[in-house]
Image (spheres, rainbow, N blue to C red):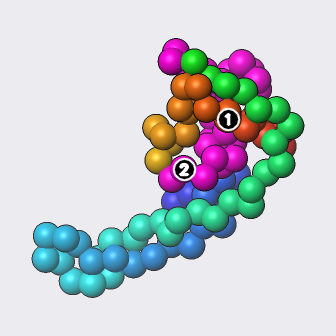
Amino acid sequence: MIDRRSRYATTPVLAAGDTAGGAPGDQAVLDLRVADPPSSVLQVVPDASDRADTLAWRYYRDAARYWRICDASAELDPYDVVSPGYPLPIPPDK
C-alpha cells in the first residue's frame, strides 16, 4: 500500500509475471512514474563530493527531498543524476 501523500500515489500498478516461472500477473509492480519537468531556478556545477541527497540538504534543508533534483534530470538512474563538472538544475521545492 502506498501512502496517499507519496510521490508514487498516482502511479499505476501493473501485474507482472514472476521470472522464476510464476503465472503472469503474480506480482504487483509500479509503472514508471511520469513527472512533469519542473522549471529550475538554479543550476549548479557539482564537484566529486556532491550527491543528490547532500544537494537537497544544501538547497532544501531536507535530504529526503533529493527526488526533486532527480525529477529535474533526464536520467532514470538516481546514481547518474549528479555528474561532477556538469551543470545540474535545482528545481523549486514545491
Q: Can you give x and y, in whole percent of width and height, for residue 13 in the image?
A: 50, 72
Is 67 left or right of 28, judged from the image as shown?
A: right
When asked about the image quadrant of residue 12, the answer is bottom right
Point 61% across, 32% down: residue: 86
Q: Residue at x 51, y 53 (%)?
A: 76
Relative horizontal placement of residue 66, taking residue 29 as reference (left or right) = right
Residue 25 in view (yes/no): yes
23 in relation to 33, above or below: below
Q: Which residue is mark 1?
A: 88
Q: Residue at position x 67%, y 35% from top?
A: 88
47 displayed left or right of 27: right
Neighbor class of circle 2 (other Cα within 10 Å; few <14, some 14-19, many 20+) is few
The answer to if 67 sits in the magenta stretch is: yes
Magenta stretch prevailing secondary structure:
helix
Observer-nearest residue: 12 or 41?
Answer: 41
Q: Nearer the viewer, residue 53 or 43?
A: 43
Image x and y of residue 40, in percent: 81, 42
Q: Is residue 49 left or right of residue 21?
A: right
Task: Name the residue type under label 2.
Answer: Glu
Q: Picture coordinates of residue 80 (x, y %)?
A: 48, 40
Q: Which residues are magenta?
A: 48-76
Q: CA distance from mark 2 to mark 1?
A: 11 Å
* Viewer-nearest residue: 61 or 37: 37
Q: Position of residue 3 (x, y in %)?
A: 62, 54
Q: Look at the numbered disc 1 and give the secondary structure of its residue.
A: strand
Could one spot residue 65 in this view of the protein? no
Location of mark 2 (residue) = 75
Mark closer to the chain start, 2 or 1? 2
Residue at screen point 55% across, 33% down: 82
Q: Quadrant of the C terminus?
A: top right
- Quick check: is 5 in the magenta stretch? no
Please identify the quarter of the rendering in which residue 10 is found.
bottom right
